[in-house]
Image: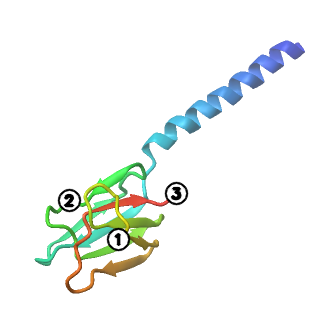
Amino acid sequence: MSVRRRLTTATGAVLLTLAVAGCSSLDRTMVGTLSYETDRDVVVTVTSPSVNGCHRLLVPRGATRVENDTLVDIRLYPTRDCKGKHNIYLPTSTSNEIAPGALPWRSYSVIH
């Protein structure tokens, strides 16, 4: 096999590996469950949500308690757009409950 042919084959293999790695990151998930509870004691559990973007919680009034049983840390927000200074860091395998009189959690984002 010529040097040029080996170089072409090696280059193709590297490009293929990069393409596969790049595409697989598009649908990465948090792996595990994220559970949250409403002020009416309704529990919602989401399995392996995406790691990308801002996620609104699936309850319109927000969550009073959140349990992060995923493999990644998240940040909780009282707004629907993952913005604002009144947010909280929630590490993996932990939970958080809002203080009396505090706004409920309405969105979250993954910490990369």
Q: Position of residue 34 (x, y in %)?
A: 33, 66
Q: Earlier in the sequence, mark 2 or mark 1?
A: 2
Is 100 placed above or below 2 here? below
Q: Say which amino acid is labelled 1.
A: His
- Could you tell me the amino acid type at mark 2? Leu
Q: Earlier in the sequence, mark 3 or mark 2?
A: 2
Crowding at mark 2 (Cα within 10 Å: few <14, some 14-19, many 20+): some
> Gap between marks 3 and 2, in whole Å?
22 Å
What label sits on residue 109 in the rendered view? Answer: none
* Disc nearer the start of the sequence (1/3): 1
For label 1, the crowd category at 10 Å Cα-Cα, with few meaning under 14, some 14 to 19 and many 20 or more, is few
Q: CA distance from mark 2 to mark 1?
A: 20 Å
Name which quarter of the figure residue 8 lies in.
Answer: top right
Q: Is residue 21 visible?
A: yes
Identify which residue is drawn at 26% across, 65% down: 45
Q: Closer to the camera: disc 1 or disc 3?
A: 1
The residue that disc 2 covers is 58
Q: Which residue is mark 3?
A: 112
Q: Quadrant of residue 105?
A: bottom left
Task: Count residues near mark 3 (Cα–Cα under 10 Å), then give few for <14, some for 14-19, many for 20+.
Answer: few
Report the side of 15 relative to 10 (left or right).
left
Which residue carries the number 1 mark? 86
Nearer to me, 1 or 36:
36
Expressed as whole percent of the image width and height from the top left, the position of residue 21 reads: 58, 38
